[in-house]
Image (cartoon, helix red, strand yellow):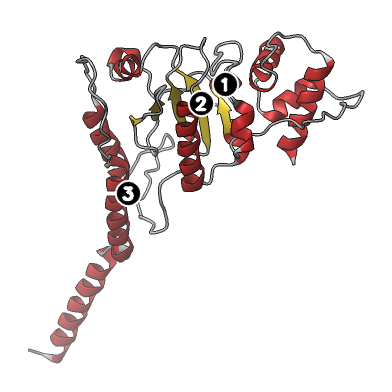
Amino acid sequence: MPLTMTKNFYYFILALVVASCATKNPHKTTEKAYDQQLKTLEQQITSKEVQPIPPVAPLSIDSLYAQQLHIVKDSISKIGSTPLVNGINTQWIGTVNFNLRKPSFVIIHHTAQDSLEQTINTFTKVRTQVSAHYVISENGKVVQMLNDYLRAWHAGNATWGKNTDLNSSSIGIELDNNGFEPFSEAQINSLVALLTKLKKDYNIPTQNFIGHADIAPGRKQDPSALFPWKTLAEKGFGIWQDEILEEAPFDFKIEPALRIIGYNTKNLSAAIMSFKLHYIQTDTSPTLDRKTIDTIYSIYKKQVQ
């Protein structure tokens, strides 16, 4: 073969090699690490520990829990190009630095039903469109119904500060209580034990343990005025006013203070009632007496510390 042809052939082969290298994925190593970590996280959000439940009357349950888990797994596993409205397609390059998003709030409810079995029945019917991560019975039994990392449907149309999607950032806990009876000691002991675990696991701020009524003024009144918020605050779950209230300044503004604490003040009377349900309890009217104003001032100061 002539020298010129040999050189040309050499350059041709070199060009093919260069072109081949150019088409290889330079992120192959990190993509592999991404896939491995994703599998670990998928196992984490789809695993569930079996908790024995005392024998109850047979329930008709049409739960789609398993199917829903497959939908979640499929959605977090999707990779590839996504078309945008401007005609550009996204490019997928998996990072190796990620983990699961963690809940930052705990919302406490009462079930407004008459038994643990009734609540489980409600939360396992598709038509009800409602759920919670945990249900605690009157005798202290704790039933987990959803992995902590998954989104339960417990908050509904609710806001706290600038957070307008509490379902996506919170864990919902339902207490088996009809709203008219005191909460049992066994139930509150189990609640405190569960809150201790959740606060440690997810580093949830003390002030982010709140009630359904706090995030939905005028729409919800749970947990009831019989709920021991002061006891929880003493254990580090929520904040409480000073024992000796400092008198609020003459120019102290109620509406912005409640808004800074977290309350939706579009209906100021409803916000005041929700605040009093949590912090006054003996009076849940919209009346702004001296005690209410000074209590708002005390909580406001703690919230902005």
Q: Is residue 213 rendered to the left or right of residue 139?
A: right
Q: Is residue 98 left or right of residue 256?
A: left
Residue plotted at (77% across, 31% down): 243
Q: Position of residue 139 (x, y in %)?
A: 40, 24
Residue positioned 64% across, 36% down in the render: 234
| Residue appearing at x 58%, y 28% in the figure | 210
Please state the total of marks drawn on the protein image.
3
* Amino acid, disc 2: Ile
Mark 1 or mark 2, whichever is nearer to me: 1
Q: What residue is shown with label 1?
A: 227
Crowding near the residue tagged with mark 3, few <14, some 14–19, many ≥20 C-alpha atoms within 10 Å: some
**Disc 3 designates what residue?**
41
Compared to residue 287, the image places residue 240 above or below, namely below
Residue 45 placement: quadrant: top left
Q: Amino acid at mark 1?
A: Phe
For residue 98, above or below residue 303: below
Furthest residue toward bottom:
3
Is residue 74 visible in the rendered structure shown here?
yes
Sequence-wise, the earlier of marks 2 and 3 is 3
Q: Nearer the viewer, residue 147 or 177?
A: 177
Residue with the mark numbered 2:
108
